[in-house]
Image (cartoon, helix red, strand yellow):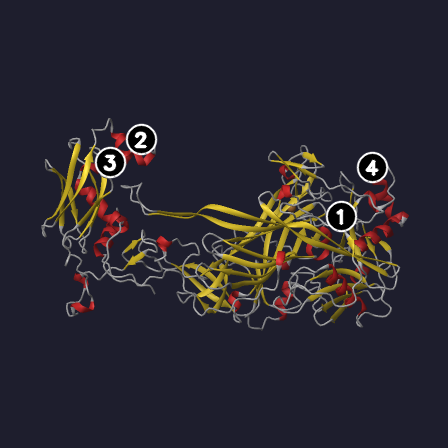
Amino acid sequence: MKRMSRAIALAAAAVAVAAGLAVVPVSAATAAAPTVNCSGDARIEKSFENGTEWQMCWRIDSKHGLVLEQVAVKAPGEDSYRRVLDSVSLGQLNVPYDTGKNVWNDITSYGFGNQYLQKLSAAECTTGTLRDYGQAWSITRRGETTNYLRTIPSLCITDTTRDLAYRSHEQTWGSIEDAPLFTATGQAFDLTIVSKVDWYEYATKVEFTDEGAISFNLGATGDVSYEDFDADATTGWPIGTDAADYAASHWHNAFWRLDFGLDGQALQQVEQYDSTLGEPGEQAPLMHTTGATVEHPANLVPAADTTWWRVVAPESRNADNHARSYEFVFPGSQLYQGNPITQPLISVTNYADCEQFASNNLNPACPNLSVLDYVANSADAALTDPVAWVNSGFHHVVRDEDQSPMQTHWQSFSIMPRDWTAQSMSTPDGRSCIDGDPGGEIHSDESPCEAVEPTTPPETTPPTETPTETPTPTPTEGEDAPSLSISSTELSPGESFELEGAGFAADEAVEVVLHSEPITVGTLTADAEGVIAGTLELPAAAAAGEHTIVVTGAESGLTAEVAVTVASAPTGAAAAGGGSGAGMLAFTGTALPIAAASAAVVLLAAGGLLLLLRRRRRSAITSA
Amino acid sequence: MQSPPSNTRTRRLPYAILGGGVVAAAAIVGGFMAIPAVSGANGAESSEARALDEVTSKPELGSPRDPLSPAELSYAIHLASTDASVPDDVTSVDGSAAPQVLSVDIPTRNVDSPDRLVDVFLFDYTSNQTFLQTVDLTAGSVESTARQGVQPPPSPDEVDYAFGVFLGDPAASAAVRAEYAAVAGEELESIDQLAVTGGAFVPDAGTLGADACSIDRCVEMQFRVPGGGYLDTTGFVVDLSTESVIGIK
Ligand SMILES: [Cu+2]
């Protein structure tokens, strides 16, 4: 009820004034279109129904596997793409066994491309599109080198959808059926390759959504290591009969290398945010979330599970003048403490040509170095061109169900836009006017919608102010007759209906009467604009036949009417709702104890419905 | 797939096993016949492995981040291998006078460069050096960096050679040959009898017996019996620089 009374207050204060409308996010200082240096099948371009578009180049590196470069997104309404990532790929896959007997570095010792890249069949890309990539190898014997090349279908591009991308129902419980519902099935696509390194087969999958998010996923399948059945009860798990064949527990420490290129900006920074409980508040303690710039290359470890990071381009601003950024989202990452390289969740470094792998670096210009070395060797430099080495770790305690083949287990994280656009990339027209505190009411049935700013209530206006400073529209003036509309012109006795009208005097009571034998239906109260709206119930005593509903303003004397046809009395209460078996729907209006009290219904209507029902405005729509 | 395909090797037909059913000729998925594993959905198809013509003059170049065409690949290897940075006494894995080609890729750096750049990794078994030859196909130039003790993944050619070294050492391979004979009922005589993978072996503090591998080029291997499990290969690595088998712990 608390929320209801607040809504009533908002409705009472709401007056239509010319509001600046942001129809689409307007980009500040549009940069030149980012470079995209690939063609044909090497380029991926995707557009979604909400207007979001992605563009990138893909290839399969002999060691990194899937490499995506020049990754750019175009938000709905923007003129051109904006770069998100210069490059992203796996930077290492470190697999230590809990028995201490084996450690694998699959990227730098084997690689995810060339002979380890798997040919995908149509049967494992059933809803997607396959693209080819080459496997190249050279054979040297007796001083003669022969080079070979073949192409195999190896990239699966799949379109995906997700229901409930968002949902917002402008519903009050008194009127379920007719309220606007904003919901959407989100769209995305993912890119997947499979690499087989011995018994393990790894799926590298990167997904791009229509809301600008990117998720990075490593799926492990194949078979439990044949070499590692030598564990005991603490270093493994028995997967043979009884207490036999203890398969060694192990880690899949996947390092992703994200080279950020936010909006092509020369200056990019990394910020860490932490939340701490503060002083007592009225109902709960205050919590303060504060950010700090990570000034230098660093190894980042979460201070608490509320710690988060983002990469921000301070000079790239969205239409709200907020700096564009991408934020890391971790659904849970396990950090292997047995190796200092895998202790940080993220290591951030400045881009450097030779730093390509998270450990065992293969570039002879900085050989065998790791992320820890990259950080240590540049610890005094300002961090302005960040590469994030993200440790997406998973401790695999083997199950009986891992045989055979092993059920694919996924380890994932994502980056999502924070303030890339002033509103969500999937904002529907009916909500496009909401940018900040919408104040009073939203005309969400306009396309695009209109946000109506509340005027300052008279009692709070300082008396010294001249009236012209806060002009109050006088909608009733110059209006010949009020308007009136009804949700249905065919009603049954006892059935609820909605009335909507305009052109009455501000704040006056409006009586609703059924004619020709006058039966009072209820009373509505006009708002400051002279608008009425509410849900009423047709009196059970109404006789079948043609009737007229007449509304009369108590102060102005203005009247309006609408014709209705009353059907025969219903056979039962359920019939009124028209949905006897549909849960809440069946109880609409009729089954509630307060439904008989018109005043209560009017209160509810004023509180809820006034917010969503359209009101006529005289002022032209002005757009920003 | 591990061993480079050639006509002397057993050619296995592609097959897929889906949901428990072996499908050799065609996959039955959701009630309709799909073309077998070789073919993709939208016309994506494996090509035959082809030996590339030698290319010694600049071919038509693709966009900087496009995959390499056969001619670009061949030309990049030519420029990388014949560059003045490659020592005169260079040797490959079999000791013959040529650099060992490890990998050819588009560089994972300088993504916005307008030049057609290619990273060719070479190994020189004489000096035990890894060469990163960054070839600029646009300019026809090579930028070279070389170092001992950097071990990129072994090429299929090197793994093939390492298997020969291993099998050629009767003492070192005795246990694996016996295990194979017990499992398969025949003598292990050729790499074609196994699926072999090989990784770069880099010794760490916990490994005993392989100190030489900090400079030498060493390969650790896994042998899978077709249709079966793996043989125990944990006790050795092959030092390709000395063509010897090293026992490790
Ligand atoms: Cu695992």
Q: Where is residue A523 in the image (x, y as percent from the top left)?
A: 15, 44
What residue appears at the point 67 percent right and 32 percent down from the top-left corner? Answer: A242
Q: Tell me which amino acid carries mark 3.
A: Leu
Which residue position is annotated with label 1? Answer: B1
Q: How far apart are marks 2 and 3 (CA)?
A: 15 Å
Front position in the image: B134 or A9 = B134
Q: Position of residue A71 (x, y in %)?
A: 56, 60
Q: Mark 3 lies on which chain?
A: A
Tag on residue A580? 2
Q: Tell me which amino acid carries mark 4.
A: Ala
Q: In this view, does B89 lie to the left or right of B42?
A: right
Pointer 3 with pointer 1, Cβ within 8 A: no
What residue appears at the point 89 percent right and 50 percent down from the top-left corner? Answer: B169
Image height of B12 relative to B50, above or below: above
Which residue position is annotated with label 3? Answer: A592
Q: Distance between the residues labelled 1 and 2?
A: 65 Å
**Can residue A315 be seen in the rendering of this structure?**
yes
Q: Position of residue A527 (x, y in %)?
A: 18, 53
Looking at this view, name the residue that lies furthest to the top: A571
Q: Tell me which amino acid carries mark 2.
A: Ser
Q: Which chain carries label 2?
A: A
Q: Tell me which amino acid carries mark 1.
A: Met
SS at badge 1: loop
User: Does label 1 point to a residue whose CB lies under 8 Å from ligand 1?
Assistant: no
Q: Distance between the residues labelled 2 and 4?
A: 71 Å
Pointer 2 with pointer 3, Cβ within 8 A: no
Q: Which chain carries label 1?
A: B
Pointer 2 with pointer 4, Cβ within 8 A: no
Q: Residues within 10 Å of mark 3 (few under 14, many from 20)?
A: few
Tag on residue B184? 4
Q: Distance between the residues labelled 3 and 1?
A: 72 Å
Pointer 4 with pointer 1, Cβ within 8 A: no
